[in-house]
Structures are given as C-alpha cells and as structure tokens.
Image (cartoon, helix red, strand yellow):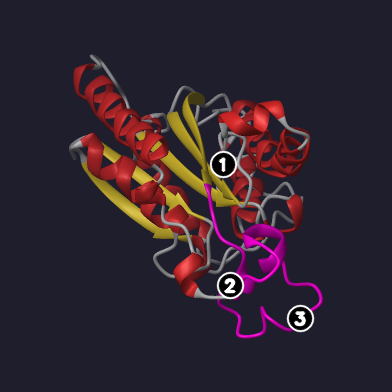
Amino acid sequence: MGIRILGVSGSPIPNSNTDRAVRAVLEASGLESDFVKLSDLHIRPCKACKSCIKDNVCKQEDDFNWLSKKLLEADALVIGAYSPYSSLDAFTKAFLERLWSLRHVNNLLRDKPVVIIVSGVFPKLLDNPFLRFTGLSRVIRRLALPVDHVSRTLVNELKMDKMEIFGQVQLRGNVPCLTCGRGDDCEMSSVSFLHGKNAKASADKCVRVEDQENIWKELQRLGNDLGAILKTKTNYEPAAKCLE
C-alpha cells in the first residue's frame, strides 16, 4: 500500500465548507486519500466499558471499527469540525472519544500527523483592519472565542493520543438561518445581526471557503507540505503495523 491520507469531516451538511476544506488539503497533498463524512456513519460515543484495554479494539458494534482500520492504515489524518452552540459538533466528538480504544498500551496513533480544520461564523482568523480601531473589534473577538475553543479542544484531545499537530485552520462558515425558510420572521434569526437590519435571508449570502483567499491558500500550503514530508520521510512505518 502506498502513502495514504485519511480525511474526516464532522459536518452533516452535504458538500459543506468543512467538507471542501478537508478535500482541499487531501488533493493538494498529491497522495492517495480517503474522505469520510461522519454523519454518513453510525458511531456511538465511548461507553467507558474498558473492553478495549487488552487488544485496542472497541467492542461496540458500529462503524467505528471500520473507520479505525482506515485511520491505522493512513499515514496522516485531516479532520474537519464545526462549532454548533459554541461547542464541538457531536459527530466529531463521538469519533474523538472512540479513539481512546487505540491509545492505551500500544499507543497506535503516536506521531501520526494531523491537520485540524474548524469552521464557524466568527473564526479567529476573521480579521478586518478596520475593526482594530473600533469597539466592534472586541465584539468580533468575543464571538470568535467558540471557534477558537473548538480548535483548542481538538488539539488537546489529539495531543493526548500523542499525534503530531501538523497544522490548524479556522474558516468562516454559515448560519442555518440563511436557508432554513424562516430566517426573516423568526425572533431567534441571526440574519439581521450578521448582514444588517434590513437584510433578507438568502442562500446568496452564504460564504464559500474557496472565496476566503488566505484560508484557501493556507489549505493548499498545508496539503502541499504534508504531501512533501510524507513522500520524503524515510523508514516510516504506519501505526497499523505496530501489532503485526
């Protein structure tokens, strides 16, 4: 088997910004890759039963064991998440919890490179020079905290598994109010807050990761660099071979 990268997205939206950002890194690497959408799988949270201690195999009968084999066979991971309710999405959280089965004794994910991508309405990297000199700067940065928190959560959890954090990207996503059909008459809608008092909900207002120039360039750079390092790494043994 040649060098291979696994891409995983926690976004349930079809062909979402998060999906396309993950795919962008995979494609820029120039290597073989697999892309998995967690919402298409059935992966429960960890039950803390500790049945995986002896053999690093989770005993829950769902799609995680299939996905864990792909992860162990991969030479690197690209993981994309988003930040609903100012927290890490449930699909990604369940996946991360189940990685515990690969951790103890043999530490099967040690040193595996991982690129972390997080999308949200106000990512930390959303930076307008004008805002630095207005009161809005403090507002924007406070709203950006959830995305930064999710990114740090991913970093901390993956570091616990001794994975190598190769890079991080925060990109701007969209609120469901723009396309839910009730964005103009719902008192909880964020359309006017984000787009102005008289703004109307419309898919035309949705942002695309491809149009976030600096972010898109960073995704391309990370993919190129990850591919180059994996191609030149000598004596590299995938974690899947640790128990062979």
Disc 1/disc 3 C-alpha distance (Å): 48 Å
Q: Residue 114 sits in which quadrant?
A: top left
Marks 3 and 2 in Cβ contact (< 8 Å): no
Tell me the crowding category of disc 2: few under 14, some 14 to 19, or many 20 or more residues within 10 angstroms, Cα based: many
Which residue is tagged 2? 178
The residue that appears at 62% across and 37% down in the rendered structure is 151
Say if 226 sits above or below 232 in the image: below
- Depth check, mark 2 against mark 1: the one in front is 2
The disc at residue 5 is none
Q: Amino acid at mark 3?
A: Cys
The disc at residue 56 is 1
Residue 175 lies, in percent from the top left, at 62, 64
- Evaluate whether residue 70 shows in this view: no
- Depth check, mark 1 against mark 3: the one in front is 3
- Evaluate whether residue 198 shows in this view: yes
Which residue is tagged 3? 186
Q: Amino acid at mark 1?
A: Asn
The residue that appears at 60% across and 41% down in the rendered structure is 123
Residue 30 included in the magenta stretch of the image: no
Relative to 209, is 123 on the left or the right? right
Q: What span is colored magenta in the figure?
A: 172-200
Disc 3/disc 2 C-alpha distance (Å): 11 Å
Tell me the crowding category of disc 3: few under 14, some 14 to 19, or many 20 or more residues within 10 angstroms, Cα based: few
Disc 2/disc 1 C-alpha distance (Å): 44 Å
Helix, strand or loop for disc 3: loop
Pick whichever, 201 or 232, lies toward us. 201
Residue 174 included in the magenta stretch of the image: yes
